[in-house]
C-alpha cells in the first residue's frame, strides 16, 4: 500500500535531481532541512527518527543530498522524509515535508473498530507488515 | 522533465562575446579598479579566466566532457589580498558555471578539526555541506597537518577533504591558503593535496608605494585626509613597519589608520576650544601618525600587531 | 461641502434639534489615537444632504447620538463618547458616494464581544433616512481591542501540525448532492473522496438533520468513512461535520458526539449568529477541535458595492470571534469575487500585519497582535484545470474545495479526487522548481495528465470552463479584470 503522506506522494517517486530542486527551493526561503526515517508510517507517528539535527545555513542542496545518501546507505528499506523548518515568527514549525525514500514493500495500516455505545465505534490503527 | 531530442551542438563560439555576456569582463575590470597593485595576481586571474572560458567553449562544442580540476592554492604573506581575491574567484567560477552558487566559506583548522574522538568527521562534514555549490577557503591550511603527533585529528579532516575534492569536483572548489614556504612543506608531506591542486597563485608583498596608495584609498572611503606632513609620516611609517615583526601588508595599514583616527579624536577632544568644522574633523595631522610606537623602536615589548 | 463647526458652551445643550456636525460628531482636525477603533463607511447621502453632515450623522448614530438634544448627556463624559467623523472624501469614479472615516474611543466597546461591536457599528446607521445607502468598507481594530479576543481555536499553523500536512494547499470537496442522500450513501461519497486523495470532505451549509438523514446517522457513517480512508492512505483525514442547529444546546450535543467519534473538525454556518459562533469557538478550544465556518448568507449584505458590510470586515470579525476556516472566495469560480479584492480577504485571514493596500481594499494598517491565523477556503465552481491560477492567487495556506470537480468526474469520485491531488502536487512541485506557473500552468497540467488518466479526463471535461462575469464588488483603486481571462 502506498502511503501518501507528504506533499509529493501522488507524483511518481522523485529522482535525486528532482529532490535537489525542491531542496533548493527550501534553501532559497532560508528554511532548515531535517532528514527523518522510520519503518512505521502510522498516521499518528509524529516523531520519526532524526538523521542528525536539521541542517541550518546551507546554500546548496548538495549538502542535504550527501546526508540523504548516507541515510539511505543505512536505512534504505525505511521511509525517509525531508522536513523543512520555517523559523518566521507566527509559523515556527515544519513548513514543507515530503517522502524521499520508501521501503521496497510498504506495510499496511489496519483499522481496528471497538464497539462503544450503540453503533458508535472507537477507531484505532495498527501498522501491519 | 520532458525527454526532448537534444538540440544539435553549435559549430562556432564567439569567445569575446562570451567574455562579456558571462560577466567575467565586468568582474575582472572591477578587480583592476578596486585592488591596488597585485599585478602578477591579476595576471594569473586573467589567465585562469581565459582557460576556463575556453574550457567551457570546448565543452559546448562537445570537445570535452569532464570538469577540470579547479582546486587552488593561494600563497603569500598576511594582508596580501588572498581572501579578497578568493571572493572574486568565487564570483568568477559562478559566472562561468563552474560552481552553482558562488559563495565563499572561509575556515581555519579550528572549524574543521574536533577536540575528541568522533568529533572531527561531523565537524568537517558540516563545513563541507555549507560550502557546497561555492568555494571553501582554508586559511593556513598547513595547520591541518601536524607531523609531530601521529594521532592528531587533523589527519581525519584531511582525508575527508581529499575525498570530497576528488569526488565532488562539480560541487565545490577548495582554495588552500597560507605562507608560501609552509605550504610547500605541507604539499611535500601530503602529495594527495599537491596532485589535486591545479592552480597556484602567489601573492607578493605590496611595495611601499602601493601601501601608501592603499592607505590613501582607505582614508578616502572613510572621508579623512592626510596633511602634507602626515603623508610624509605615513611613508616613513610604512618603511619602518615593514622591518618590524608581524608585518601584515594591507592589514597593518588598516590597523595603523584606525590608531591614527583614535589619536586624532583624542587630540581634537583635548585641544579644541571652539566649534570644529568638517575639515578639522576629517584631517589627520602628522603628529597623529608620528606618535605610533613604530617610530620608537617598534613592537618589541611583546605587544602584537594591533598595538601598531 | 459647507464648513461645519461644533457648537460649544451653553448653546450646545439647549432643547431642540441640532445638526450632527454641530453636536460634535465631525472633527476634521481629529488625530485618531492608537487605541481608537476606526471605521470606513461608503455613504450615499440623499439629494441635498451635505456629505460632512451625513458623515457626522453616521458617527453619531453609531455612537452616542439620538435625533435631538438630551440633557442627560451632561451627566456623562459625552465629548469622549462621541464618535468622530474625521475625514470625508469622494469615492473615485462614483459620483454621489463618499468615503467617510470615523474614529471610536475604545471605551465604547465591550471586551471580547462581536455582538457588542457590531451592535454599535452597524446597529442603527444603515437604516438612517438621510442616507440612501451605506456600506461598512473596512475597520481598524486596535491591538488593545484585538487582545480581548481569543481568536481561532486552532489556527492554520497548528491545524497543519495536527493534520501532518505541510507545503501545499489542503484539498477538500463538498459532498453532493447537497440534499437527499441517506446517511449510508452519504458516507460512501466521503470515503471515495478521501481515499482518492482529498484531505477533507465537507457537509454543505444546509445539511443539518432533515427527514432523509438524521444528523447522528450522518456522523456515524462519515466517521467510518474518514477512518477507513485514513487506514488506506496512512494520512490524517477529516470531514467537516456541520453541527448547525436551532439552539446552542443542540449544537453542543452534536459537537460532543462528533468529538466522541474522533472527528478532528466540526462546522458551523454564519447564520447561527456572532454569539453562537463565539460560543462554538469556546467549545472548540476546550475540545481540540478545528472550527470550520461556512459563510452562509453573507451575500445578502456583502455583495452590493453601495450598501451593506464588506466581506473583509466580516473576515476581520470572524478572526476575532475565533474560527479556523472561513470561505473567502475563489476569484475564478462560480461565485462573486474579483481577484484583488479576494486576495484582500485572504490577507485579512492570514497575515500578522495588514498594511494599507487600496488595490486589495485594505484601507487601514491592521496589527493582529499575534492572534492566530485563519485558513481561508476557496470553494464554488473551481476545477483541476484552474490549479495554476488558484495556487498563484492564494499560495499554500488555503483549502481548495472541488465539489462538482470531484464528484462529477466521469471515472468516479476516487478518480476525481486523484485528479485534483495530482494536479495540485504537480503544480506545487513545478512552482518550487522555479517555473512560471501562471503562464506554463496548462502545459504543466497536460504533462501530468500524460501519466495520470483521471487528470486527463478531468481536463478534457472541464479544461475550458471559466466563469467570466464582471464582479460587482471590485476595488475602487485598480482595474480588475477577471482572473481567468
Image (cartoon, grey):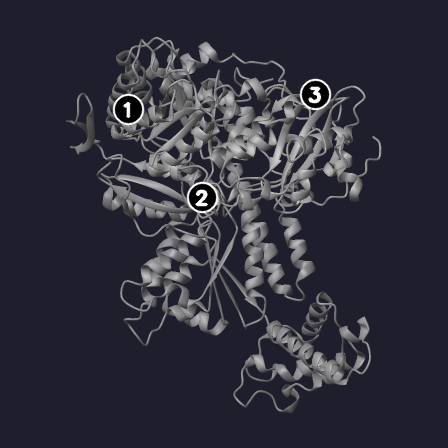
Confirm whether residue C7 shows in the render: no
Secondary element type, mark 1: helix
Q: Position of residue C423 (x, y in %)?
A: 43, 23
How far apart marks 3 and 2 lie (CA) works out to 48 Å
State which chain disc 2 sits on.
A
Front-most of A60 and C175?
A: C175
Confirm whether residue C33 shows in the render: yes
Q: Report which residue position mark 3 lands on.
A: C129
Tag 1: Cα neighbours inside 10 Å, few (<14), some, or many (≥20)?
A: many
Horizontal placement of C433 versus C163: left or right?
Answer: right
State which chain disc 3 sits on.
C
Q: Report which residue position mark 1 lands on.
A: C226
Q: Position of residue A57 (x, y in %)?
A: 45, 52
Q: Report which residue position mark 2 lands on.
A: A91
Mark 3 vs mark 2: give the one in front.
Answer: 3
How far apart marks 1 and 3 lie (CA) works out to 53 Å
Q: Residue at x 30, y 75 (%)?
A: B149
Amino acid at each position: 500500500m502506498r502511503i501518501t503522506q507528504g506533499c509529493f506522494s501522488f507524483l511518481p517517486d522523485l529522482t535525486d535531481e528532482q529532490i535537489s530542486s525542491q531542496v533548493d527551493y527550501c534553501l532559497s526561503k532560508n528554511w532548515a532541512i531535517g532528514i527523518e526515517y522510520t519503518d512505521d508510517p502510522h498516521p499518528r507517528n509524529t516523531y520519526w527518527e532524526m538523521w542528525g539535527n536539521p541542517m541550518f545555513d546551507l546554500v546548496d542542496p548538495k549538502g542535504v543530498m550527501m546526508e540523504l545518501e548516507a541515510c539511505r546507505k543505512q536505512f534504505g528499506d525505511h521511509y525517509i522524509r525531508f522536513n523543512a523548518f520555517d523559523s518566521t515568527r507566527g509559523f515556527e514549525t515544519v513548513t514543507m515535508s515530503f517522502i524521499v525514500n520508501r521501503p521496497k514493500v510498504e506495510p499496511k495500516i489496519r483499522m481496528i473498530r471497538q464497539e462503544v455505545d450503540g453503533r458508535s465505534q472507537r477507531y484505532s490503527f495498527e501498522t501491519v507488515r | 522533465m520532458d525527454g526532448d531530442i537534444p538540440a544539435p551542438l553549435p559549430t562556432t563560439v564567439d569567445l569575446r562575446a562570451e567574455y562579456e555576456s558571462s560577466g567575467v569582463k565586468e568582474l575582472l575590470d572591477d578587480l583592476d579598479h578596486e585592488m591596488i597593485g597585485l599585478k602578477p595576481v591579476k595576471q594569473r586571474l586573467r589567465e585562469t579566466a581565459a582557460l576556463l572560458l575556453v574550457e567551457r567553449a570546448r565543452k559546448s562544442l562537445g570537445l570535452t566532457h569532464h570538469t577540470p580540476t579547479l582546486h587552488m592554492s593561494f600563497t603569500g604573506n598576511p594582508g596580501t589580498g588572498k581572501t579578497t581575491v578568493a571572493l572574486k574567484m568565487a564570483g568568477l567560477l559562478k559566472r562561468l558555471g563552474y560552481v552553482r552558487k558562488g559563495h565563499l566559506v572561509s575556515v581555519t583548522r579550528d572549524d574543521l578539526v574536533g577536540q575528541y574522538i568522533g568529533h572531527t568527521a561531523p565537524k568537517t562534514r558540516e563545513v563541507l555541506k555549507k560550502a557546497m555549490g561555492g568555494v571553501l577557503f582554508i586559511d593556513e591550511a598547513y595547520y591541518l597537518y601536524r607531523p609531530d603527533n601521529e594521532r592528531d585529528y587533523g589527519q581525519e579532516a584531511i582525508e575527508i577533504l581529499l575525498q570530497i575534492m576528488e569526488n565532488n569536483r562539480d560541487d565545490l572548489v577548495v582554495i588552500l591558503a597560507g605562507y608560501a614556504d609552509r605550504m610547500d612543506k605541507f604539499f611535500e608531506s601530503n602529495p594527495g593535496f599537491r596532485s589535486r591542486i591545479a592552480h597556484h597563485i602567489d601573492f607578493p608583498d605590496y611595495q611601499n608605494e602601493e601601501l601608501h596608495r592603499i592607505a590613501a584609498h582607505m582614508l578616502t572611503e572613510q572621508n579623512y585626509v592626510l596633511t602634507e606632513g602626515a603623508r610624509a609620516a605615513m611613508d616613513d611609517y610604512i618603511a619602518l613597519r615593514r622591518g618590524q615583526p608581524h608585518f601584515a601588508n594591507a592589514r597593518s595599514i588598516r590597523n595603523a589608520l584606525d590608531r591614527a583616527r583614535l589619536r586624532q579624536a583624542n587630540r581634537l577632544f583635548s585641544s579644541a576650544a571652539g566649534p570644529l568644522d568638517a575639515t578639522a574633523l576629517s584631517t589627520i595631522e602628522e603628529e597623529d601618525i608620528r606618535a605610533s610606537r613604530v617610530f620608537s623602536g617598534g613592537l618589541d615589548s611583546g605587544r602584537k600587531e594591533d598595538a601598531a | 461641502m459647507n464648513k461645519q463647526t461644533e457648537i460649544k458652551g451653553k448653546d450646545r445643550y439647549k432643547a431642540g434639534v441640532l445638526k450632527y456636525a454641530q453636536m460634535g460628531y465631525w472633527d476634521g482636525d481629529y488625530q485618531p489615537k492608537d487605541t481608537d477603533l476606526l471605521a470606513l463607511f461608503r455613504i450615499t447621502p440623499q439629494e441635498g444632504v451635505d456629505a460632512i453632515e451625513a458623515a457626522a450623522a453616521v458617527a453619531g448614530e453609531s455612537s452616542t447620538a439620538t435625533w435631538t438634544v438630551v440633557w442627560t448627556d451632561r451627566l456623562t463624559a459625552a465629548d469622549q463618547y462621541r464618535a468622530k467623523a474625521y475625514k470625508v472624501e469622494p469615492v473615485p469614479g462614483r459620483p454621489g458616494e463618499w468615503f467617510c472615516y470615523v474614529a471610536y474611543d475604545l471605551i465604547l466597546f465591550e471586551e471580547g464581544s462581536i455582538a457588542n461591536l457590531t451592535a454599535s457599528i452597524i446597529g442603527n446607521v444603515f437604516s438612517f433616512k438621510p442616507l440612501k445607502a451605506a456600506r461598512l468598507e473596512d475597520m481598524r481594530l486596535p491591538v488593545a481591542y484585538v487582545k480581548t479576543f481569543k481568536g481561532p481555536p486552532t489556527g492554520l499553523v497548528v491545524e497543519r501540525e495536527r493534520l501532518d500536512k505541510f507545503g501545499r494547499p489542503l484539498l477538500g470537496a463538498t459532498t453532493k448532492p447537497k440534499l437527499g442522500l441517506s446517511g449510508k450513501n452519504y458516507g460512501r461519497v466521503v470515503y471515495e473522496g478521501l481515499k482518492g486523495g482529498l484531505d477533507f470532505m465537507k457537509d454543505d451549509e444546509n445539511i443539518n438533520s432533515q427527514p432523509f438523514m438524521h444528523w447522528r446517522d450522518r456522523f456515524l457513517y462519515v466517521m467510518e468513512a474518514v477512518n477507513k480512508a485514513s487506514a488506506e492512505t496512512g494520512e490524517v483525514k477529516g470531514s467537516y461535520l456541520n453541527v448547525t442547529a436551532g439552539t446552542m444546546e443542540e449544537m453542543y450535543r452534536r459537537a460532543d458526539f462528533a468529538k466522541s467519534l474522533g472527528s478532528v473538525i466540526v462546522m458551523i454556518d454564519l447564520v447561527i449568529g456572532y454569539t453562537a459562533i463565539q460560543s462554538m469557538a469556546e467549545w472548540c478550544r476546550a475540545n481540540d477541535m478545528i472550527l470550520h465556518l461556512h459563510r452562509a448568507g453573507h451575500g445578502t449584505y456583502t455583495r452590493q458595492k453601495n450598501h451593506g458590510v464588506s466581506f473583509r470586515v466580516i473576515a476581520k470579525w470572524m478572526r476575532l470571534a475565533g474560527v479556523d476556516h472561513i470561505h473567502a472566495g475563489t476569484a475564478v469560480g462560480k461565485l462573486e469575487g474579483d481577484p484583488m479584492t479576494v486576495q484582500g480577504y485572504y490577507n485579512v485571514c492570514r497575515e500578522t500585519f495588514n498594511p494599507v493596500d487600496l488595490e486589495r481594499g485594505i484601507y487601514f494598517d491592521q496589527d493582529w497582535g499575534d492572534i492566530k491565523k485563519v485558513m481561508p477556503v476557496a470553494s464554488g465552481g473551481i476545477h483541476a484545470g484552474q490549479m495554476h491560477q488558484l495556487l498563484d492567487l492564494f499560495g499554500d495556506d488555503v483549502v481548495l474545495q472541488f465539489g462538482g470537480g470531484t464528484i462529477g468526474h466521469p471515472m468516479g469520485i476516487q478518480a476525481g479526487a486523484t485528479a485534483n491531488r495530482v494536479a495540485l502536487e504537480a503544480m506545487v512541485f513545478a512552482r518550487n522548481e522555479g517555473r512560471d506557473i501562471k503562464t506554463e500552468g496548462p502545459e504543466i497540467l497536460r504533462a501530468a495528465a500524460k501519466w495520470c488518466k483521471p487528470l486527463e479526463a478531468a481536463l478534457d471535461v472541464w479544461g475550458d470552463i471559466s466563469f467570466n462575469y464582471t464582479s460587482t464588488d471590485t476595488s475602487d483603486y485598480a482595474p480588475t479584470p477577471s482572473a481567468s481571462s
